[in-house]
């Protein structure tokens, strides 16, 4: 208990140290009041309270609770640590809460941590809950420490800060879940991560510096096979199964999209776009990707 308090207090210092700019996510440390936290970032108590309608009593703050601060859609591209970077991005608030809830915060607040971290953005978690963990709410997921720890472990490659250029096609990455591979897959201009559960998750931004670690943003949450969830079959309206005589130009017109978008979503076609293998399932729209 005593150790927890010390760690959480140390962590809050690390998170706030770099920040002239207001973070989007903040961990309550010992003796914090909302007024003091606001003052540190030149926010009024009313502004801090308004950003946290979930707090039933603003005078009783639980140590280690994550609160939101109005950060003006911050999109930091570097941070002093992984946690510091995540704190300063408005699109990473769910991941930040997951990191704290899983007990990974002090590891990721370490400025000397050498690692590669894949960071799913808020939309990725929304999609996970809407399409895969359909019987869970975000609050239920965030309350499941064991599940979060397993999920997040699959997003961390320890001891190596791999930049985009080192994520070469066919490279197998060893994450903290050593038994579960992540394979880099680079068709044409996209970078994807093939997971042991069968996803091909797109990497949407690379090389965010976070102390000695590097962070890459992913469009989806990586699911290890051991997580034991079944990937949903593509929704109606998301897939076209190639039949005799299909050509991309006509399919683009038929589905009200473009040839470029189809090639981007189905990078396996880029090697030879004029030959569509019969029976191939083509993904039609960006929102169809998990
Ligand atoms: C919190 O307040 C108590 C009592 O005033 C003090 O002993 C303790 O050092 C404070 N903790 C921190 C982290 O400031
Ligand atoms: C603090 O906020 C007030 C009102 O929003 C603004 O006028 C003032 O310049 C700010 N001060 C700093 C140091 O940012
Ligand atoms: C943040 O972005 C959203 C959506 O793009 C926008 O509605 C909102 O006004 C922005 N907030 C700030 C403070 O810039
Ligand atoms: C997450 O990334 C996807 C793909 O780039 C993007 O469409 C989506 O808007 C992002 N979500 C947020 C909250 O920024
Ligand atoms: C959700 O459903 C799965 C089976 O489909 C079950 O194993 C799991 O316990 C359920 N979770 C919750 C929170 O109800
Ligand atoms: C990566 O690991 C998977 C699963 O063990 C294996 O099927 C695949 O061939 C490996 N790829 C490479 C390039 O070693
Ligand atoms: C891939 O990237 C190159 C260089 O940025 C560009 O010229 C080419 O059109 C891209 N190809 C596709 C299929 O997007």
Image: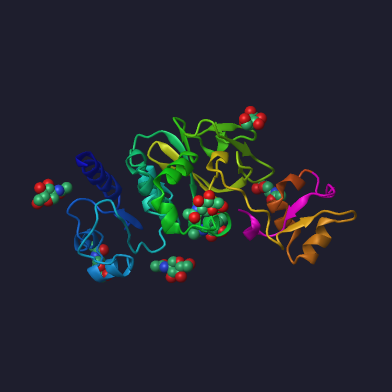
Q: In percent of the image, x 79 and y 49: which residue is there?
A: 280
Asked whether, in this view, residue 60 is left or right of residue 182, the answer is left
Asked whether, in this view, residue 170 is left or right of residue 60, the answer is right
Asked whether, in this view, residue 73 is left or right of residue 64, the answer is right
Q: In percent of the image, x 61 and y 48: which residue is there?
A: 230
Colouring mode (rainbow / by chain / secondary structure / one colour): rainbow
Which range of residues does the magenta coloring cover? 272-290
Q: Quadrant of the N terminus?
A: top left
Q: In percent of the image, x 64 and y 33: which residue is there?
A: 170
Residue 169: x %, y % from top left: 64, 35
Return the residue nearer the eye: 250 or 125.
Answer: 125
Q: In percent of the image, x 74 and y 61: which residue is there?
A: 258
Q: Is residue 138 above or below residue 9?
A: below
Which quadrant would residue 138 be assigned to in this image? bottom left
Work out whether residue 286 can be spotted: yes
Q: Is residue 158 above or below residue 76?
A: above
- Say whether residue 135 is magenta: no
Q: Is residue 36 above or below residue 104?
A: below
* The residue positioned farthest toward the right in the image shown: 245
Which quadrant would residue 26 be assigned to in this image? bottom left
């Amino acid at each position: 208990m005593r150790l927890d308090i010390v760690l959480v207090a140390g962590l809050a210092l690390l998170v706030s140290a770099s920040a002239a700019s207001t973070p989007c996510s903040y961990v309550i440390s010992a003796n914090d009041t909302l007024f003091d936290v606001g003052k540190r970032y030149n926010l009024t108590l009313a502004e801090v309270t308004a950003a946290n309608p979930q707090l039933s009593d603003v005078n009783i703050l639980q140590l280690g609770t994550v609160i939101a601060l109005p950060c003006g859609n911050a999109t930091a591209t570097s941070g002093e640590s992984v946690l510091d970077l995540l704190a300063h991005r408005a699109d990473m608030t769910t991941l930040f809460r997951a990191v704290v809830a899983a007990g990974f915060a002090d590891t990721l607040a370490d400025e000397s941590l050498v690692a590669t971290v894949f960071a799913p953005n808020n939309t990725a978690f929304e999609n996970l809950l809407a399409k895969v963990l359909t019987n869970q709410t975000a609050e239920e997921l965030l309350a499941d420490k064991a599940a979060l720890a397993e999920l997040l472990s699959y997003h961390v490659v320890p001891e190596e800060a791999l930049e985009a250029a080192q994520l070469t096609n066919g490279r197998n990455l060893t994450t903290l879940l050593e038994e579960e591979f992540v394979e880099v897959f680079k068709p044409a201009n996209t970078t994807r991560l093939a997971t042991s559960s069968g996803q091909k998750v797109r990497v949407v931004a690379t090389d965010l510096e976070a102390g000695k670690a590097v962070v890459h943003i992913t469009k989806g949450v990586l699911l290890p096979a051991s997580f034991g969830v079944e990937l949903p079959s593509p929704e109606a309206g998301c897939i076209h199964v190639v039949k005799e005589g299909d050509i991309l130009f006509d399919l683009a017109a038929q589905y009200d999209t473009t040839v470029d978008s189809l090639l981007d979503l189905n990078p396996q076609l880029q090697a030879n776009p004029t030959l569509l293998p019969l029976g191939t399932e083509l993904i039609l729209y960006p929102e169809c990707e998990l």
